[in-house]
Amino acid sequence: MPDTSHPKSNTPPIDVSGYQLALKNAPHTWIFRWEPGDEDALMRHIARAARDADTPLDWPTAALACKQILHMTSPPTSDVRPPAS
């Protein structure tokens, strides 16, 4: 749905169908956005960025990002136990 609070805005509406994760590791803020099913490609990209000496993304932050991505996209677990036999 378009933003109607600013009728003359040329900014396209934000697509909220995917996921977003923001991590702050001062002085940097990392914002990752992806669509369902793109988690593996995103985590490979994060690992490549952490490996690159010219990118300020460090390994601990990359590991945290991947952990959060998995947590956000994993199906919920249930505390329901199967009946005893």
Image (spheres, grey):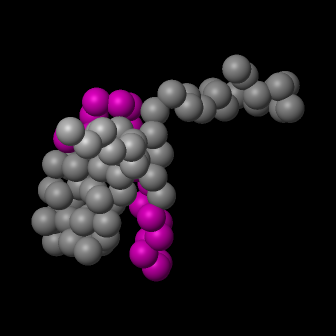
In the orientation shown, which residue stands out farthest toward the top? 1
Vertical order, 72 against 57 (above or below): above
Residue 34 falls inside the magenta stretch = yes
- Residue pictured at 29% horizontal, 39% vertical: 82
Q: Which residues are magenta?
A: 23-41
How many badges with numbers are in the image? 0
Q: Is residue 19 above or below residue 44?
A: above
Name the residue: 26% across, 74% down. Answer: 60
Q: Quadrant of the N terminus?
A: top right
**Relative height, residue 57 to residue 72 (above, below):** below
Mark yes or no: residue 74 visible. no
The one of 18 and 56 positioned closer to us in this rendering: 18
- In the rendered image, residue 79, in percent from the top left (x then y), is placed at 39, 49
Q: Residue 7 lies in what quarter of the image?
A: top right
Is residue 25 inside the magenta stretch?
yes
Q: Residue at x 13, y 65 (%)?
A: 51
Closest to the observer, 6 or 36 = 36
For this orientation, the residue located farthest to the front is 85
Measured as percent of width and height from the top left, residue 39 is found at 27, 40
Q: Quadrant of the C terminus?
A: top left
Q: Position of residue 40 (x, y in %)?
A: 20, 41
Q: Residue at x 30, y 49 (%)?
A: 70
Q: Is residue 17 visible in the rendered structure shown here? A: yes
In the rendering, at what x and y percent does residue 8 appear? 82, 26
Left or right, 66 with reference to 5: left
